[in-house]
Amino acid sequence: MASLSQDRGRKGFRLSFYGLDKRKRSMWLGGFSRRQATTVKTNVEHLLVSRAAGDTPDVHVARWLGSIGPELRKKLITAELIEPTADDHGPATLGPFLNQYIASRKDVKPETLATYRQGVRSLIDYFGADRRLDSNTAGDAELWRVWQATEGNQRETERSEIAESTVRRRTGLARQFFTHAIKRKLISENPFDGLPATVRGNAKRQQFIPQETIYRVLKLATCPELRAVIALSRFAGIRIPSEAVALTWQDIDLEAGRLTIRASKTEHHEDGGIRFCPIFPELRPYLVALYDRTNPGIDCPLSAPVFRRWRSADQNIRTPFLKLLRQAGVEAWPKLFHNMRASRETELLAEFPVKDVCSWIGNSQAVAMEHYAMTTADSFQRAICGSTGGSIRANQEISEDDTQNEKPSETRVSEGSCDPVMSGPMGDTGFEPVTSTV
């Protein structure tokens, strides 16, 4: 029923047989001795007979199946000689499965792996490492999400709850992990499907940082590198620290007024994560000061990094910046560098086309509107004062032809205010013109 043969130049045996569907199949037993290959052949023939009769394998074949390794089991499953079990697909419990998934993701950056590990920790802290994957229900996932929102803070001891955006992000990770389990046929459905996972902007943690605040802090900074990196964050909106530490001197073209920014976050995009940003007037003095001090092209190559200090893992920009804020008497705001980046984008959106601004800052228009652009009191006040924001000028004169049958308006604007003050009594119709009766 089955036969063994050898391939020239290869160590091992090829087992050939006809399956129950009458198709010829073969199985390569690499590295097997003739005795081992003969044992496999004998047991395969028993499996073919029992499968054809619809019986379970006898005790001797069952004992042999329990002794073989995963590679041979996989070949027997592929040949449809035995049925796969949950253990054949991989770890059936949460801890081993998640650890194996993390170890397999060699295609993602260390920062992404760190985010994955946060998601793994949140699941194991609640369910336990020994929880079977197929035992999780949609109700369990819902209760986990409630726990995340109220008790899932793993960093700050002062509060146990976490922001909604973080809950959504971790829910998305949990869904991703369990989708992978479905693909590996460990489970049949994803208990996290249907839970909100789209990350929204958190208006409560958004704060516009005025330029005056940053100038106060910069006056106290004695390190030119620290001054430049703070200026790059607030006046160019670059990502800190990733885009700052990636800058080389050849990326700063002071003559053309252009920065070349390399974003590791988006290097998988079509543009390779490279974008260009103007060197704004507010930013230029800090780059010039650092350039004059470093003397690139003479004292160091143009390919040298602009910021050497924060390329080491034991150095960070946040700590000295927080120290400067305390010295300046400024209370640290949430999302320290993100809000400076968002403040710059908000300013630029008020003056330049949104497509240009998003190109300079390095995000999409949808992301800019959801996570970066902020409403400002200044815009509101300018609207009150008569700015229409469109092509029609505010307070433009009405032509004489239009005023022949109209009396001049009796409104006046009080000094020091933009609010119109109405003089004279209001008619029975109020502000609206009389509408004829139909």
Image: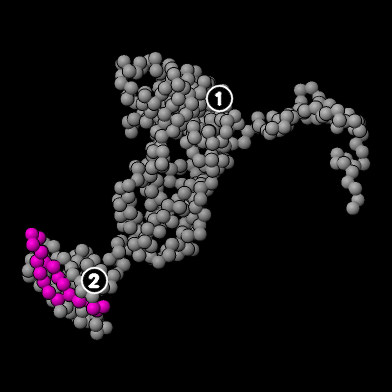
Task: Give the SS element for disc 2.
Answer: loop
Residue placed under numbered mark 1 in the picture? 211
Circle 1 Cα neighbour tier, 10 Å, few/some/many (<14 / 14–19 / ≥20): some
**How are the colours assigned in the image?**
one colour
Give the residue displayed 22% in from the left and 67% down from the top: 75
Mark 2 or mark 1: which is in front? 2
State the image quarter where residue 261 is shown: top left
Quadrant including the N terminus: bottom left
Q: Which residues are magenta?
A: 2-22
Closest to the observer, 279 or 399: 399
Against 428, residue 382 (above or below) is: above
User: Can residue 38 be found in the magenta stretch?
Assistant: no
The kind of residue on which mark 2 rests is Ala
Camera sees residue 325 = no
Against 206, residue 166 (above or below) is: below
Against 224, residue 182 (above or below) is: below
Asked whether the residues under the numbered discs 2 and 1 touch, taking CB atoms below 8 Å apart as contact, a structural biologist would say no
Closest to the observer, 318 or 228: 228
Closest to the observer, 146 or 425: 425
163 relative to 31 in the view: left or right? right
* Mark sitting on residue 416: none
The kind of residue on which mark 1 rests is Gln
Provide residue 181's location: percent of width, then percent of height: 37, 60
Give the residue displayed 28% in from the left and 70% down from the top: 84
Against 22, residue 78 (above or below) is: above
Residue placed under numbered mark 2 in the picture? 79
State the image quarter where residue 39 is shown: bottom left
